[in-house]
Image (tube, grey):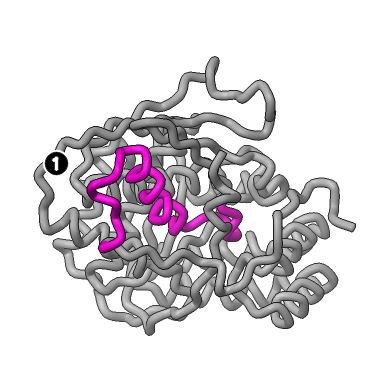
Amino acid sequence: MLPPHVSVVERTMDNTTRPEPDKADFPSNAPIVEQAAFLLEYAVLAPSSHNSQPWLFAVADDEIRVYADESRQLTVADPDGRELYLSVGCALENLVIAAKQFGLGVTVTYASETENRRADDATTRHVATVRLEPDTPAKTDQDAALFDAITERRTNHHPFQATSVPEPILERFEDDATTAGIGLELVTDTIRKEEIAALQTQADERQFADPEYRAELGYWIGSGALGASWLAARIGQLAVRHLDLGDREGRKNSTLVTSAPVIAALTATSDDLETQLDVGRVFERLALTATSEGLAVHPMSQILEVDALRADLAALLELEESTPMHLFRLGYADPDTTRTPRRPLEDVTT
C-alpha cells in the first residue's frame, strides 16, 4: 500500500516509453491544431524532479493550455510545490522553442490566480496559455541549436572534469537569466564549493533520516520513473525505503559538488508561481545551451528542500534581497546515456 502522501503513477514506466520525435514529421500543411499537438512531443522531454512529469496540456485551435498536475507533487521533498512549477516551466520553454523552430509565432500568457483552478479537478492548475500564429518568425542558428538540444539533453550524474567552462558561455548564461529577470550566481572558487558540499552532506543526511522522505523517493524509483530496469527499480525501492543511506549519499553528492568546475544557482526576489515558472524556463534554456556546447548539467535540489540549509546557502552566496531557487552543477563529463522514460502523450493531454 502506498503512503498517503504519495501520488499514484498511471503505469510503471520503462525505457521504451519515451517519445523520439523527428522534426521531419512536423505536419507543416495541417491545421494549426495538429501542429500544436505535435509540439507536445518536445515539451514532455523536459526534466522534472524525480522525473515526476507534473504537467498536462490541452490543445484547442491555435492555443495550448499548460496545466500543473499537483497530484504528482513530491509532498515531502517539495511541500510548497516550487520544484513542481519549475518542472512545468521547463516543459513550457521546450514548447516555445519547438514552436519557433517550426515557424510559429508564440505568445505566452500566465493564468491569473482567479482562473487557474479547474472546477472538475482541484489538483489540476492552469498556469499558462501558449497562443500560436503561423508567423514564420526569423530563426537564428542559436534558436536551431537549442531546438536540436531538446532531444539530446540529459541529466548527467557522473563526476565532472576539472576543465573550466569558457567565459563566453558563462556570459551567455548570465545574459539569458538577466533578460528573464532571474539572478544567476556562478560559484567557481574551491572554498565556496567546499562549503556548498558541506551543506549538501547535511541535506542528504537529514532527508534520508526521514522515513517519509525515503518512502516517497522509493516510490518513484520503484515506478521506473528514473529509468532503471524493472528489477533494478524494485531493488532500489526496497533499499531506499528500508535503509538510511544518508551518510553514503552525502559523501557521494558532496564529491560531485566539489568535482564540478561551476556550481550555479538561479535566484529571484520573489517565490511566487510566475517566478517559479520563469526560473524553470531559464533553467531549461541554460540546460539546452549547455547541451549544445558539449557541457553537462546536473540539478541538485536537496539543499533547497531543507529550509534552514536554503537560508545557509543564501548567506553563503551573500544574497540580500533574493533567494536561491534552483541549484545545479555545470561542467564537462563523460556522457550519461540514461534515457529516462516519459508518460505517454495520451496521459498528459486533457
In the image, which residues are magenta? 24-53
Left or right, 210 with respect to 101, comes to right
Q: Is residue 170 above or below residue 260?
A: above
In this view, the residue in front, 315 or 334, is 334
Q: Position of residue 275 (x, y in %)?
A: 42, 34
Is residue 47 magenta-colored? yes
Q: Is residue 207 magenta?
A: no
The quarter of the rendered structure image containing the N terminus is bottom right
Say whether residue 25 is left or right of residue 157.
left
Q: Residue at x 22, y 69 (%)?
A: 293
Q: Quadrant of residue 96?
A: top left
Residue at the image position 22 percent from the left and 51 percent from the top: 101
- Residue extending farthest to the right is 1
Between 238 and 92, the residue placed more toward the observer is: 92
Residue at 63% from the left image edge and 50% from the top image edge: 306
* Residue linked to disc 1: 136
- The answer to whether 232 is drawn above or below residue 46 in the figure is below
State the residue at coordinates (68%, 29%): 121
Q: Position of residue 169 (x, y in %)?
A: 19, 62
Q: From the viewer's perspective, tell me whether residue 182 is left or right of residue 67.
A: left
**Can you name the residue that lies furthest to the top here?**
114
How far across and down, in percent of the image, does residue 235 sit?
Answer: 77, 80
Residue 76 visible from this viewpoint: yes
